Amino acid sequence: MRARQQIPADIEELRDQRWWREATRQVETAFDAERFIEQVGFATCLTDSRRPGPSLYVAVCGRRDAVMPRNVQKDPEASSTWVLKDELVQRGNVYYGKLASKKTMFLAPRMIPYFHAVWGVRRADEKKRLSRSARAVLKVLRGEWEMATKDLREESGVKDRAPFFKALEELQAAMIVVPSAVVYQPTFTYIWTLGVGRFPDALRKRVNRETAFREIARCFLTSAGSTIPGELARVTGLSRKEAGLGNHDLVDEGFATRLAPGTYRLAADPTISR
């Protein structure tokens, strides 16, 4: 089994600062969380240090080696992250959903057009790209605009639990449907709505896929300082080929330098040692 490539010490220190992995700069409020997401461009919600990329949970912990405990219900940092997630969904200033490869992620508004160019499904393509169950759920939401999980399940006619939640995941991955609120009383439920209602300009903006690969790669490299083989693909859900195309474009324009196959660094950043 091939050993995992190590991140250089200077890059880890840079990521501590840019990914808010420091006790002096950790996320405590929803406003902090929105600033964090805007700065990094995109982040996962509840992943820990064992997964690459910026994470809201790690930023709440404020340390590089944060590991999610097995009993998350009794962990104050996991609970804080969950509460912040609910607040961010309610505030609607950043995009939240289960995106590529079933990754639950936050996106800064500036990154929405690029993710949508890669994974989004446009209305003209829905019939050939979405399942029948997903189209049934979507039809109800387009009529009602906003609906709780139980009501949506009933109205859509997709009453079996597994196909219904698979349809919701499909619509989130297609960047069509997003949660707009979380309700705990009288019972726990998400409220679902159309993403275009929250981010109309970003989701209607046309971007070609090659540009999207490059800008997603640029966003990650800006906050990460460097990327090792396969890292961008694991963080974003891009294929390794797509990630490579994005990084190669950055090299061509002088934004990044290629140190070895799959390894890239920012071309001009005084905070990174050479």
Image (tube, grey):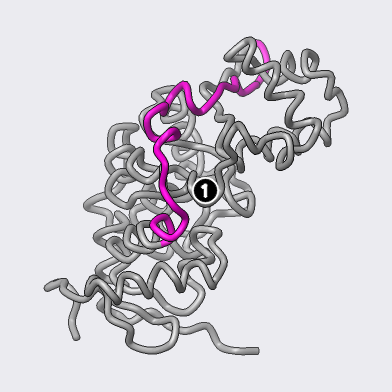
Residue that lies at the very extreme toward the left in this rendered image: 270
Residue 28 image position (x, y, % from top left):
32, 38
In the rendered structure, does residue 146 fall within the stretch colored magenta?
Answer: no
- The residue shown at (69%, 33%) is 168
Residue 114 image position (x, y, % from top left):
42, 49
- The residue shown at (24%, 50%) is 25
In the rendered structure, does residue 189 fall within the stretch colored magenta?
Answer: yes
Q: Nearer the viewer, residue 197 or 265?
A: 197
SS at badge 1? loop
Q: Is 83 situated left or right of 29 in this image?
A: right
Q: Is residue 19 above or below residue 195?
A: below
Q: Is residue 175 above or below residue 63?
A: above
Residue 57 image position (x, y, % from top left):
44, 49
Residue that lies at the very extreme toward the front in this rendered image: 124
Q: Nearer the viewer, residue 53 or 127?
A: 127
Image quarter for residue 248? bottom left
Image quarter for residue 187? top right
Q: Quadrant of the N terminus?
A: bottom right
Residue under label 1, please give it. Answer: 46
Mark 1 neighbour density, 10 Å: few (under 14) some (14–19) many (20 or more):
some
Q: Quadrant of the C terminus?
A: bottom left
- The residue shown at (71%, 42%) is 129
Q: Which residues are magenta?
A: 186-213
Q: Nearer the viewer, residue 220 or 118?
A: 118
Residue 72 image position (x, y, % from top left):
59, 45
Number of numbered discs visible in the structure rendering: 1
Q: Nearer the viewer, residue 270 or 13?
A: 270
At label 1, which amino acid type do we have?
Leu
